[in-house]
Image: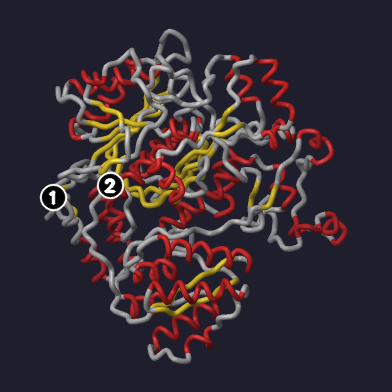
Amino acid sequence: MSISIHGESHAFEQRKREIYLKVSRGEITPQNAVELLKHISDNNRIDTKASNSSYQVNDIAVIGISSLLPDAENVDELWDNLVKGKDCISDVPLERWGAEYEDIKDDSSSSACDKMGVVEHIDKFDASFFNILPLDALNMDPQERVFMQEAWHALEDAGYANDRLDKKNCGIFVGAMGGDYKIQTRMEGLGNSFISARLAYNLDLNGPNMTIDTACSSSLVAIHQACQSLRNDECTVAVAGGVNVISTPDTHYISNKMGMLSNSGRCRTFDNDADGFVPAEGAAVVILKKLDKAIEDKDHIYAVIKGSAVNYDGATNGITAPGSPSQTALEKEVYERYDIDPSEFSYIECHGTGTKLGDPIEISAMKNAFAGYTDKKQFCYIGALKSNIGHTLAASGAAGVVKLMLCLEHKMLVPSINLSKENEHFDLRTTPFKVVRDTVSWDSKSPRKCAINSFGLSGINCHMVFEEYSSPMTEYKCGQKELPFVFSAKKDSALKELLINMKEFFEKNDISDLDAVSYTLLNYRKSYSKRLAIIAGSREELCEKIGSLIKLGDTKAMSAADQLGSCENEILKKIVTDYIGNGSVSDKLIKEFYGEGCPPVRLPVYPFEKRRYWLEKNDSKKNVYPYDRIHISSCDDNSLLLIKDNARCLPCIY
């Protein structure tokens, strides 16, 4: 079934020109151009044979995700926690803050919030992976370090953490607030702009690059800005998300003084006992492309962003007070501009910080926005990730987006917890909304549609609408009896950890599409200096061989020769020997073995080394690195002795 694309004709014509230009440059053959042009016709159509939904020229595809959140080092752990309705709030990290927080707590009030959504190992970083000197890493804002690693994982998930990434046209959009690690380092000269710049510098990216601070709505505004940049052809791929690291007790101290934090130590979104939020740290990143380009490039598409907008509250009861009229106006603007009918929504991820007055204002705004479209009651579920993990501040919007992607992927809705009695200031029975109380199947006869709100403390609001994408592709099979499974890392220790993670993943998940797994590892993952390949014809055989390697404790134990003795497939032999020998396999050979291939499937990502880089406050004077940084590539012998710990590193990014 054909799906119409409506929208500005110039965008359609631009896609045709891009295809013609590729032919003229010799980048694709005329035959390939004909196939690409079949995706679009003179009346602006994409043939996806997928569903009865209308995909528009302005649609943006989410093709990769990653997150690091309280009690969840990756998206799979996050999903497990959400399905279980787990409360991920814990005590503040006294081992990180020491007695200083006890002093602040005593000085603040006896009822001050001493809970937090803590990310373990927030002080750890794999500096050598990114070719960063240890002393530089020590003085970097940990928000830079965390975002770099999560962005890399998201690129891996999308299949672009390799030479496939269009470096000249890749944009970076980060939502982040001012980090407090500078209190430790006293390096006031490096601002938030380095959070986005650091990754672009390291990967040599030339697209738009910006760090956005709109307080709590920062990361969703960053995703919105990334969508706009893609639509304006300022970039072809966008890395967008947010990060928040709580390095010192200052956030708790100031927020407690302002009466913003929950005395009960929980985010009780929609609850009558809601008394404020609990701060949390973390990061979430998504990879975005235009939908038609993502389809053309055979990307894995988690969902489609149908539309979004940003506005400001204007004058309210106070600069930090939310405004219901402006929230309603924002939501209606999105629906009208992008021809969206909210009566088709079945879930909304609310901002939901858990305040007695803030939650009713959000409910009222959504109710008013829906009023012009439907008078149906309680057909749309609502929930809030903050009830599980706390408020990740600048990263909260992006974290909510990752939650939505997982819900769409699993076709399930997960509970909003810490809810006993609904807030007395609203009656959901008179609204289109009902709270998700348990993990439920997300049933729908048509593509699932959902939305997310994110509102900044300073009054900047963002609303975004998503739609499920139904891929026309069936289970991929390349028709080979045996398959190569390649694994690679920069160090033997990382390679072993990757094997352990892969084995656990294969054993935990009923992986039937081994052909897609094999293709993903070879075609979409980057190869490093430490490499191995395993030939297997079944999941059981693969797990057995990985287990043998782990048990031996030597990733070098299985060479190409060890496995190729009984292999009769000459193409398979060539793939394995080329990969182990030089880390690359020709596109011609890959196509000859796998055929047309398939989109990447989600697999365990690179296991970064967890090495501590954390400057204690009382060490700041003696350890801070001077601004006139040494370039290791131009160091003399005496200077190299001063940085002997960096012998394994490549030239410093400075």
Asked whether the viewer can see residue 313, the reply is no
Location of residue 232 with respect to 419 vertically, above or below: below
Question: What amino acid is at disc 1?
Answer: Asn
Please give the residue where the numbered disc 2 appears in the rendered image: 411
Taking the spot 29% from the left edge, 26% from the top edge, the residue there is 331
Q: Tag on residue 43?
A: 1
| Relative to 264, 552 lies left or right | right
Relative to residue 77, is residue 638 drawn left or right? right
The foreground one among 26 and 110 is 110
Name which residue type carries label 2: Lys
Colour scheme in the image? secondary structure
Q: Residue at x 17, y 21 (%)?
A: 372
Q: Earlier in the sequence, mark 2 or mark 1?
A: 1
The x, y position of residue 428, in whole percent, is: 26, 21
- The numbered dot on residue 610 is none
- For the image, the number of numbered tags is 2
Q: Position of residue 164 (x, y in %)?
A: 43, 62
